[in-house]
């Protein structure tokens, strides 16, 4: 008999995992709380594009769907363009020649993966079924059919909870277990999305192959390109406190004044600012940590296990990497689920914690430093080092974005590099000596 697998949530991670499990020959049923997003309109103001990078691509490649996604959905962004208040633009490449991160539509990506999962023949997606909890001993999940109001109980050989940051499996069932650790931390900042439309002829108003940032210290605006010539722009800012906070931008006049003063070049391009501002929701951002991630034959994956803030663009990528890692462990241990899940959480929990630390760290970098001349010089020195001594120095951003080095290792090495560079940048004549071999030797000696 075919082994029955249940996946809770047909989001980004759940639908990719369905492809993996179907390819392994399991009979997969995915239960999704919402209706079929391929038939629903995408809600404006709900994060419509995401940055996909190497870890995500590796996981897509493993099941042979990367090329389809690349050709249909992905726009390469080779670097950041920083927008100063004076309209000055500064470009900083993300990595080496040929390296890029990719802007993909969240809805497009999710729809595509659901279709690929269904196409595999072993996957059924059941909509309008909200998980109400799991009985770990019986390996039985309960779902509420939101159309009929009736509950159903489903047993499975294994249950994969991919139901996102506010996971019902975690909340309803794991949090009721003794010694389950749980921490939910909302940061002080929220975000609001604005849509910068295409020009009338469909062309882009900004350079299409870059991620645009307006760094302003305590807050920032970013923009990622969409396929239709528009950009999804996101303002990250404190909810309260300070002159510039969401609480202090109440009236239309205050909003207009704020954008004119702080983001003048953006304001000049944006036709429906006040309308977008009033219509789009203000959302909160949280980091959620928990442990263990598994009980018996049920396990958490993706945001359900390690939701993070979006500043490294790694939430989806790390969830996709979970799929890759879980697949390798099934390869090694077969379907001895408690053993597989135990190995999974031992390997992935330190990396989940590390990507959360990295994400917060990168928030400060993006918000406070990317427009700073010393920061840009430091990055140039690091880029030179990595070009000349790739085996000795890989910048933190590249470790996270363009490699599969475990996040935990990237975090540890990155913090060590950061401490070295902090001292190096204090040298008063750094601008004169930054390209010298003597400086390179000095930096590398400190790695030993
Ligand atoms: C503003 C913003 C920008 C981001 N940018 C990036 C980026 O650039 N790059 C990146 O890699 N990541 C980014 N992320 C993170 C990324 O969106 C998440 O990490 C990713 O969506 C996680 O996928 P998931 O499948 O685990 O969860 P989700 O995508 O949240 O999917 C969970 C699914 O489970 C369903 N569900 C929920 N509860 C139940 C239930 N009780 N029963 C059944 N189904 C249920 C939901 O309807 C949903 O379909 C960003 C996030 C935000 C908020």
Image: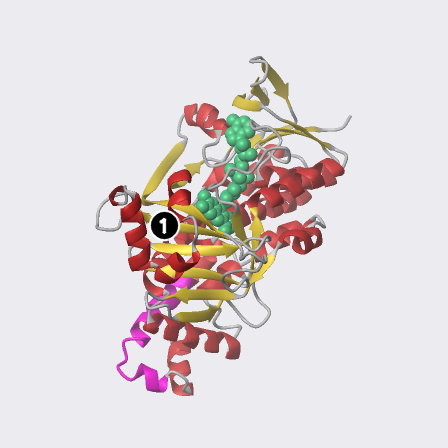
- Residue farthest to the front? 200
In the picture, the quarter occupied by the N terminus is top right
Where is the C terminus found, in terms of image quarters? bottom left
- Residue 214 in percent (x, y) is at 38, 60
- x 73%, y 41%: residue: 23
Q: Going 45% across and 52% down the picture, which residue do you hit?
A: 233
Viewer-proximal residue, 182 or 221?
221
Q: Which residues are magenta?
A: 414-433
Residue 93 vertical position relative to residue 308 in the rendered view, above or below? below
Asked if residue 291 lies in the magenta stretch, the reply is: no
Q: Position of residue 45 (x, y in %)?
A: 46, 42
Majority secondary structure of magenta residues: helix
Pick the residue in front: 101 or 409: 101
How is colour applied across the structure in the image? Answer: secondary structure
Observer able to see residue 87:
yes
Q: Is residue 21 above or below residue 226?
A: above
Residue 344 falls left or right of residue 365 = right
Residue 24 visible from this viewpoint: no
Q: Give percent across and percent down for residue 52.
A: 56, 53
Left or right of 261 in this view: 63:
right
List x then y, in percent, for residue 414.
Answer: 41, 63
Question: Could you tell me which residue is drawn at 44 percent across and 36 percent down?
Answer: 291
Residue closer to the observer: 53 or 424: 53
Above-or-below relation of 341 to 76: above
Judging by the rendered image, the residue that carries numbered circle 1 is: 236
* Furthest-left residue in this view: 242
């Amino acid at each position: 008999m075919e082994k029955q697998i249940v996946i809770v949530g047909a989001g980004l991670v759940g639908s990719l995992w369905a492809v993996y499990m179907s390819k392994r020959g399991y009979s997969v049923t995915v239960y999704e709380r919402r209706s079929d997003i391929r038939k629903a309109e995408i809600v404006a103001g709900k994060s419509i594009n995401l940055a996909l990078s190497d870890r995500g691509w590796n996981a897509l490649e493993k099941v042979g769907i990367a090329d389809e996604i690349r050709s249909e959905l992905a726009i390469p962004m080779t670097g950041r363009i920083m927008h100063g208040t004076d309209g000055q633009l500064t470009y900083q490449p993300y990595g080496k020649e040929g390296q890029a991160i990719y802007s993909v539509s969240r809805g497009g990506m999710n729809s595509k993966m659901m279709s690929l999962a269904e196409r595999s023949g072993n996957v059924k997606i059941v909509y309008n079924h909200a998980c109400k909890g799991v009985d770990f001993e019986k390996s039985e999940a309960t779902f509420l059919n939101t159309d009929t109001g009736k509950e159903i109980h489903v047993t499975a050989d294994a249950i994969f909870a991919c139901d996102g940051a506010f996971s019902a499996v975690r909340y309803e069932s794991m949090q009721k277990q003794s010694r389950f650790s749980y921490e939910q931390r909302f940061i002080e900042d929220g975000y609001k999305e604005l849509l910068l439309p295409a020009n009338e002829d469909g062309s882009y108003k900004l350079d299409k192959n870059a991620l645009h940032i307006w760094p302003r210290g305590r807050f920032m605006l970013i923009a990622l390109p969409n396929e239709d010539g528009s950009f999804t722009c996101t303002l990250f800012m404190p909810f309260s406190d300070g002159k510039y906070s969401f609480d202090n931008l109440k009236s239309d006049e205050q909003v207009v004044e704020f954008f004119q003063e702080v983001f003048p070049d953006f304001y000049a391009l944006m036709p429906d600012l006040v309308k977008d501002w009033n219509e789009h929701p203000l959302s909160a951002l949280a980091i959620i940590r928990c442990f263990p991630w598994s009980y018996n034959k049920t396990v958490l994956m993706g945001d359900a296990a390690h939701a993070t803030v979006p500043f490294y663009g790694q939430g989806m990528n790390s969830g996709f990497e979970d799929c890759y890692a879980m697949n390798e462990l099934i390869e090694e241990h077969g379907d001895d689920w408690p053993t597989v899940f135990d190995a999974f959480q031992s390997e992935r929990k330190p990396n989940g914690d590390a990507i959360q630390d990295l994400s917060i760290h990168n928030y400060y970098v993006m918000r406070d430093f990317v427009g700073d001349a010393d920061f840009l010089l430091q990055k140039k020195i690091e880029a030179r080092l990595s070009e000349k001594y790739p085996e000795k120095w890989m910048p933190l951003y590249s470790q996270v974005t363009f490699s599969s080095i475990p996040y935990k290792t990237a975090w540890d090495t990155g913090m060590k590099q950061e401490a070295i560079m902090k001292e190096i940048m204090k040298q008063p004549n750094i601008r004169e000596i930054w390209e010298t071999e003597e400086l390179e030797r000095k930096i590398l000696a400190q790695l030993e």
